Amino acid sequence: MRLAVFGVSFLLATSALVHAQESAPAPAEAQTQAAPATPGGDPVVARVNGEEIRRSDVQRFQESLPEQYRSMPLEMVFDPLLNRVIDTRLLAEKAEADGIAAEPAVQAKVQEAQQGILRDELLRRAVDAATSAEQLQAAFDAAKGEDGFALEEVRAAHILVETPEAAKEIIARLDQGEAFAEVAKSTSKDPGSAQQGGELGWFTRDKMVPEFSTAAFAMEPGSYSKEPVQSQFGYHVILLEEKRSREPSLEEMREELFQENARKAIEQTVAEAREGVTIEKFNPDGSTPAPAGEAAPAEGGAAAPAE
């Protein structure tokens, strides 16, 4: 609990300093000659007992903050963030001096944090390599040769009403020759399409609720639904105008290809890490799991009878 409170207080202090007036006089220790910039655009921005702090250290600290601070230009929040980096280093050094770093529980947390950082960096690099422009283009080219690559689309219009009785009345009016667009304008409860004569444009199956898509894709061009189509929004009368099949562009598939390549990269990296490794798993109480096909020991130590 103390750690949690400290973390919140530390963040609040950062927030307060971000919005503090910059007109306050600088402390004496800050009145030093500016450190010379170093090649590569990562200058030394402070020294603490001779130990250098670079601009990249402040940038990394900013990246660990909530989005509202990450999105700010670094120069806007530079001074308070630099102070937080300095404080973090000094507090860590004090923890070392006080012997806290040598405590087994703390060492375990440090090891866990290090493992998490290394895990994330390894997976990030694997994902970056697998989702480069070249890799996504290659995945797109491979997908072209697979069944189901082409997109099935329909262009449709609809009239939305609240009851099946109202939908049947509309179907009767269409049967008598009334224009679908005019009926849609006067009766449809869909504010997004009513004034366009019910027009929905082109769409794939996944863009509409299942009940609507199933009905629309089963219809023939030029026909309208002879029975009301119920969905979570009400009752629809659908006019199927056109059908087509087309190949999607790389841009349309980019997100899907990115997610698939990233998933494969992560799975492959995990598999490589596990290759040749001996792993033993135990029960929550540390006991050895029963062999496959055998019942676990019953409470009290006796083996439970097999069913």
Image (spheres, grey):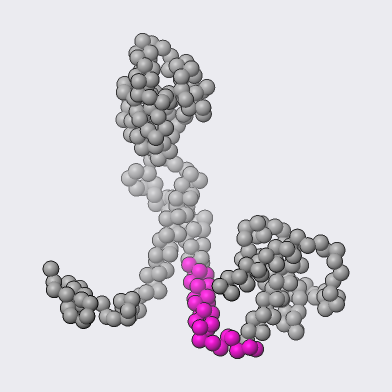
Along the viewing direction, whichever of 192 and 57 lies nearer the viewer: 192
Q: Which residue is drawn at 84% across and 74% down?
A: 27
Question: Which quadrant of the rendered structure holds the C terminus?
Answer: bottom left
Position in image of residue 275 (x %, y %): 35, 75
Stretch of the chain drawn in magenta: 97-123
Give residue 109's position: percent from left, percent from top.
52, 79
The quarter of the rendered structure image containing the N terminus is bottom right
Q: Does the magenta stretch include residue 251?
A: no
| Total number of numbered discs in the rendering | 0
Is 121 in the magenta? yes
Residue 83 horizontal/vertical position (percent): 73, 72
Q: Is residue 261 toward the left or the right of residue 148 in the image?
A: right
Locate residue 156: give its quadrant: top left
- The answer to whether residue 291 is visible is no
Judge whether 282 appears above or below 73 on screen: below
Q: Residue furthest front?
A: 300
The reply, left or right, for residue 131 in relation to residue 171 is: right
